[in-house]
């Protein structure tokens, strides 16, 4: 790929057309693929996961004319193939940098962060819980209470009371937790900016 | 959701970096094409963080988690969030326990002609309160920061590396997993002794044990800054106790 290539509006529009003829759905699909690519890169321990996901998308967009014409199947699979190449190049570059300049730097960073206090997160969490509805707040706090078998039993009871399966409760608790997590991140950014 | 125990297990192994390249690629492809499998990944990610934060991963998983899963700042941030959430849930559970007692007392005092009962209840409350206070001071930790140590044959003076623990701990206790050396035959019973740099020693209670490691817990309130060494003694089938050669070092800062 030409590394000087930049995503143009025309290429981006054609990429969306390829994802779905309906522009709204195409936008949703684009966001889905981007967030999943980010997770894949994070799962592979990449520090610049968002940049790598964007690089993957740019590469697909750069050859969107050929791809839209010749490729058959789920576009996500095509993105995945390109993501593999981007990752391969990233690892190769990173290896060179690590051995030249930063031996062992990751392990030092990790140890520092592992021992970090969660007090700022805790303060923000208390505020963010206040933004949830009573129902959601009760659900998520109850879901995360208890230890070991007591927790498992409590969750079964909670699911029974709500009239849903335990797995459905699991997903429901996760979705509320994500809202909380985003709120806490925003709160930390605001506090950090003060 | 189409999640099955098999998918959940595979995703868990993916997150811990335990899959071979081919299987990992298959799993990642599914993340991209199947929204439900992707959501399962997100849920499993939080669950594995919760397991780590509360010391529920076995030693091998914990090592994988620290080496593989926590490699990115995003996930380290998620871990801090998980610790905060658990701390909040724990505090809430404790508060609920403590509000029960005043309600019961008000029922007693509200009845005229039962002053003798009130006196008795007051005395009982005092006893219960004292017991509760004493027990709460020694209540076992519920949330843990974890540390995995391997045995070292050299001494601190010879430059043996020591793991670092930073105060404050953000958990009720420090759970330390001590990997047993493979060269030593398994004992039927173990005893662990903590030695501080001022020479003070005390026994530690074991919380978990399997063939490869044993775990001990130090309540956060008892952790002071300093250098520590842990020593293990094992009792063989013949009933004879012997020290396992070597030390486990850590430093609290």
Image (cartoon, coloured by chain):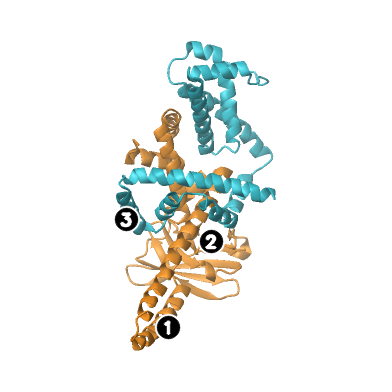
Chain colours: A cyan, B orange
Find out whether the residues at labels 2 and 1 contact each other: C-beta distance under 8 Å: no
Q: In the rendered view, tell whether residue B157 sits above or below residue B41.
A: below
Q: Foreground mark, 2 or 1?
A: 1
Residue B67 picture location, percent across and down = 52, 46
Say which chain tag 3 marks. A
Q: In the rendered view, tell whether residue A142 sits above or below residue A40.
A: below
Q: Residue at x 64, y 39 (%)?
A: A98
Left or right: residue A57 versus residue B94 is right
Please give the residue where the numbered disc 3 appears in the rendered image: A153
Whole-Å distance between the Cαs marked 1 and 3?
34 Å
Q: In the rendered view, tell whether residue B82 sits above or below residue A63.
A: below
Which label belongs to residue B126? Answer: 1
Disc 2 residue crowd, few under 14, some 14–19, many 20+, Cα 10 Å: few
Left or right: residue B139 versus residue B71 is left
Please give the residue where the numbered disc 2 appears in the rendered image: B153
Q: Residue at x 31, y 54 (%)?
A: A157
The residue nearer to you, when weighing B212 against B203, is B203
């Amino acid at each position: 790929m030409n590394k000087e290539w930049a995503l143009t509006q025309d290429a981006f529009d054609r990429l969306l057309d390829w994802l779905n003829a309906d522009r709204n759905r195409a936008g949703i699909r684009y966001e889905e693929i981007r967030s999943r690519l980010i997770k894949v890169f994070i799962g592979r321990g990449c520090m610049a996961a968002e940049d790598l996901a964007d690089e993957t998308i740019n590469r697909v967009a750069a050859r969107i004319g050929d791809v839209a014409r010749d490729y058959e199947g789920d576009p996500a699979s095509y993105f995945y193939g390109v993501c593999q190449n981007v990752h391969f190049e990233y690892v190769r570059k990173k290896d060179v940098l690590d051995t030249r300049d930063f031996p062992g730097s990751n392990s030092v960073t990790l140890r520092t962060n592992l021992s970090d206090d969660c007090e700022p997160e805790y303060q923000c969490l208390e505020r963010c819980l206040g933004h949830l509805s009573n129902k959601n707040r009760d659900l998520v706090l109850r879901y995360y209470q208890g230890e070991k078998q007591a927790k498992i039993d409590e969750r079964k009871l909670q699911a029974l009371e709500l009239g849903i399966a335990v797995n459905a409760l699991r997903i429901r608790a996760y979705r509320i937790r994500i809202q909380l997590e985003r709120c806490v991140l925003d709160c930390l950014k605001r506090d950090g900016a003060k | 959701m189409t999640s099955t125990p098999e998918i959940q297990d595979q995703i868990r192994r993916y997150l811990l970096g335990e899959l071979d390249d081919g299987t990992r690629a298959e799993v990642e492809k599914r993340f991209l094409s199947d929204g439900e499998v992707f959501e399962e990944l997100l849920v499993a990610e939080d669950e594995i963080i919760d397991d780590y934060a509360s010391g529920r991963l076995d030693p091998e998983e914990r090592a994988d988690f620290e080496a593989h899963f926590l490699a990115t700042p995003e996930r380290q941030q998620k871990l801090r969030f998980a610790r905060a959430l658990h701390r909040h849930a724990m505090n809430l559970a404790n508060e609920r326990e403590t509000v029960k007692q005043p309600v019961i007392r008000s029922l007693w005092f509200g009845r005229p002609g039962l002053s003798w009962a009130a006196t008795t209840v007051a005395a009982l409350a005092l006893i219960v309160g004292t017991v509760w206070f004493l027990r709460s001071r020694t209540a076992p930790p519920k949330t843990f920061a974890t540390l995995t140590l391997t045995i070292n044959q050299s001494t601190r003076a010879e430059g043996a590396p020591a793991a670092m623990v930073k105060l404050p701990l953000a958990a009720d206790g420090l759970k330390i997993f001590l990997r047993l050396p493979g060269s030593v035959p398994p004992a039927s019973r173990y005893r662990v002794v903590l030695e501080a740099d001022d020479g003070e020693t005390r026994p530690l209670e074991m919380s978990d044990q399997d063939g490869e490691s044993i775990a001990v817990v130090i309540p956060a309130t008892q952790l002071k800054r300093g250098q520590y060494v842990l020593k293990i003694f094992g009792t063989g089938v013949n009933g004879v106790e012997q020290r396992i050669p070597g030390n486990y070092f850590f430093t609290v800062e």
